[in-house]
Image (cartoon, rainbow, N blue to C red):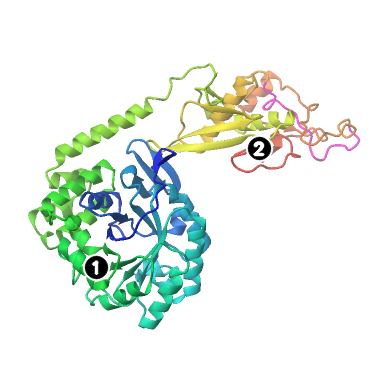
């Protein structure tokens, strides 16, 4: 076992022989349901299908409040959440139609999951419309490329989940080609693409596949006709000659189907599920959906009506007699969050270098203290160019518990950071620039700085007389214009009300620059976001 960015990573390969598995189910296979299935005896749990394009937009965030790893979308929605408890037994299922995207997603999540699976069986439009899911069954070349790329490019065992094709011959040809890619196992839903749960599952086709392949075959699709209790899982495995069995709807209706001692009362199961949902901050709409799947025919009961009316996690808890648990858990999470926030140092004015070599200072960026078109980042960039240093490089992170930002700027191989967190990425970068400037004793462009040259300048215009003195003294690349600086008279300054002006040497006309770069010299190239100006 090794430690990677706050999580324990299981280095052992996942085994697919003789296992009972929670199937991937959209809106059901979230963290609370996966943990509940593990509690009741599932050996492996699959997350719901997650689309590759959506995952590639996500940022991996260690959530210290919940002790989870979250993959967070740009809109702050958690797309995938996992925890150490399931680390060695959770399989990440993706929807994809592109080998390179699939590999990028696998590498994004591989340190936090036990296996990678590609959905090639879902017949619904949300999966097939992009050439994903069951749509892949008509393109064996693409299937082979995706799986081969994943097998070669990721450290986790790779699997796929398919449906059977119209003919047995075509089905066998496909699964043998899939086996040659080197995947660890194949899950087979024993229905064709157009068939639904009311159609009988083809145990004989799954059995033929199992006998034809040397890799483990995972039988799926038995919930409607075959699996009502735990002993039925083994009967289905024997009927299909499969290595393992994957359970979907029977587990959705009552996750204690995995329990060898028999099904637990539904009320007990639902309460246990709700506790996980609250502890891991599951969105109440997802919690409500899963509970409705468990209640099924009891949705019209008094408790079912209360659940249907619930509009928050608290109301769901109250409907199931867990109001006190919700209050206690919420207080505990709030206290944990407050404790983490309290680690931020109080505002002080002196800089210090910590053991990691980062110069730190507790400062904030107040926009009102600077002229409208001057910022500390601009001042720092100007100074770096003047000293012929590389451009400042900003690295910004977001804290999950309150969505605040902190930035570290690297200048001349030194790192600088404010210990105070900001509400936006841009503000965090400005404060990092302030720490660097103050540590070096440099002006940062504040209105109160009497010596600040940036808001008291007279610049050359592009149309100045080519025979003037500056033309006889060409600037070196990156060198600042030094000679045209002038100090405005006090009366002039007060009348400008903080507006930055420049004077054309050739015409004497005073102008307000439209482009902030005019204040630093039009010969400077624009810089990319994160490395220089905003």
Q: On the rendered image, what quadrant is the N terminus found in? A: top left
Q: Using the rendered image of the protein, determine whether residue 56 is visible from the camera's viewpoint.
A: no
Asked if residue 389 lies left or right of residue 83, the reply is right
- Residue tagged by mark 2? 516
Specify the segment rendered in magenta.
Answer: 452-468
- Residue drawn where x is 21% and y is 59% of the image: 251
Q: Residues within 10 Å of mark 2 (few under 14, many from 20)?
A: some
Q: Image quadrant of residue 289?
A: bottom left
Where in the figure is residue 177, as x and y percent of width and height? Answer: 46, 73
As displayed, is residue 458 above or below residue 26?
Answer: above
Q: Is mark 1 on a helix, strand or loop?
A: helix
Asked if residue 484 lies left or right of residue 420, the reply is right
Most foreground residue, 523 or 406:
406
Where in the figure is residue 500, as x and y percent of width and height? Answer: 66, 31
Q: Which of the marked residues, 2 or 1, is nearer the chain's N terminus?
A: 1
Q: Using the rendered image of the protein, determine whether residue 179 is visible from the camera's viewpoint.
A: yes
């Amino acid at each position: 076992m090794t430690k990677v960015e706050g999580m324990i990573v299981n280095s052992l390969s996942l085994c697919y022989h003789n296992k009972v598995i929670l199937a991937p189910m959209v809106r059901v296979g979230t963290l609370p349901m996966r943990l509940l299935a593990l509690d009741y005896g599932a050996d492996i749990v699959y997350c719901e299908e997650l689309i590759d394009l959506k995952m590639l937009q996500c940022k991996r965030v260690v959530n210290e409040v919940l002790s989870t790893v979250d993959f967070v979308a740009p809109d702050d929605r958690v797309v995938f959440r996992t925890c150490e408890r399931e680390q060695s037994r959770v399989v990440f299922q993706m929807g994809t139609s592109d080998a390179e995207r699939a590999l990028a997603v696998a590498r994004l999540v591989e340190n936090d999951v036990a296996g990678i699976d590609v959905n090639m069986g879902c017949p619904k439009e949300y999966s097939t419309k992009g050439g994903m899911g069951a749509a892949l069954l008509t393109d064996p070349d693409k299937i082979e490329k995706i799986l081969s790329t994943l097998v070669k490019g990721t450290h986790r065992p790779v699997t796929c989940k398919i449906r059977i094709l119209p003919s047995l011959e075509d089905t066998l040809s496909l699964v043998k080609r899939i086996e040659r890619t080197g995947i660890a196992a194949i899950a087979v839903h024993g229905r064709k693409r157009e068939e639904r749960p009311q159609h009988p599952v083809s145990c004989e086709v799954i059995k033929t596949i199992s006998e034809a392949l040397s890799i483990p075959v995972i039988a799926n699709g038995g919930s409607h006709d075959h699996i009502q209790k735990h002993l039925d899982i083994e009967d289905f495995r024997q009927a299909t000659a499969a290595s393992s069995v994957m359970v979907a709807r029977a587990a959705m209706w009552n996750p204690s189907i995995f329990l060898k001692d028999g099904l637990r009362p539904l009320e007990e199961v639902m309460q246990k599920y709700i506790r996980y949902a609250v502890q891991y901050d599951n969105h109440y709409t997802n919690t409500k959906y899963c509970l409705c799947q468990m209640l099924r025919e009891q949705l019209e009961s008094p408790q079912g009506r209360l659940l249907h009316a619930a509009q928050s996690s608290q109301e769901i808890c109250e409907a199931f007699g867990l109001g006190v648990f919700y209050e206690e858990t919420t207080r505990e999470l709030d206290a944990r969050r407050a404790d983490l926030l309290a680690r931020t140092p109080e505002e002080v004015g002196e800089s210090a270098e910590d053991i990691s070599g980062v110069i730190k200072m507790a400062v904030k960026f107040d926009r009102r203290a600077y002229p409208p078109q001057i910022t500390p980042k601009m001042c720092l960039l100007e100074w770096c160019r003047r000293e012929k240093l590389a451009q400042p490089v900003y690295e910004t992170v977001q804290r999950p518990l309150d969505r605040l930002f902190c930035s570290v700027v690297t200048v001349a191989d030194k790192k600088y950071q404010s210990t105070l967190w900001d509400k936006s990425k841009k503000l965090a970068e400005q404060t990092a620039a302030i720490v660097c400037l103050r540590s070096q004793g440099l002006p940062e462009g504040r209105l109160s700085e009497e010596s600040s040259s940036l808001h008291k300048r007279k610049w050359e215009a592009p149309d100045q007389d080519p025979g003037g003195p500056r033309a006889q003294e060409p600037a070196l690349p990156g060198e600042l214009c030094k000679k045209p600086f002038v100090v405005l008279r006090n009366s002039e300054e007060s009348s400008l009300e903080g507006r930055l002006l420049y004077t054309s040497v050739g015409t004497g006309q005073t102008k307000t620059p439209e482009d902030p770069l005019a204040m630093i010299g039009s010969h400077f190239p624009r810089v990319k976001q994160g490395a220089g100006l905003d």
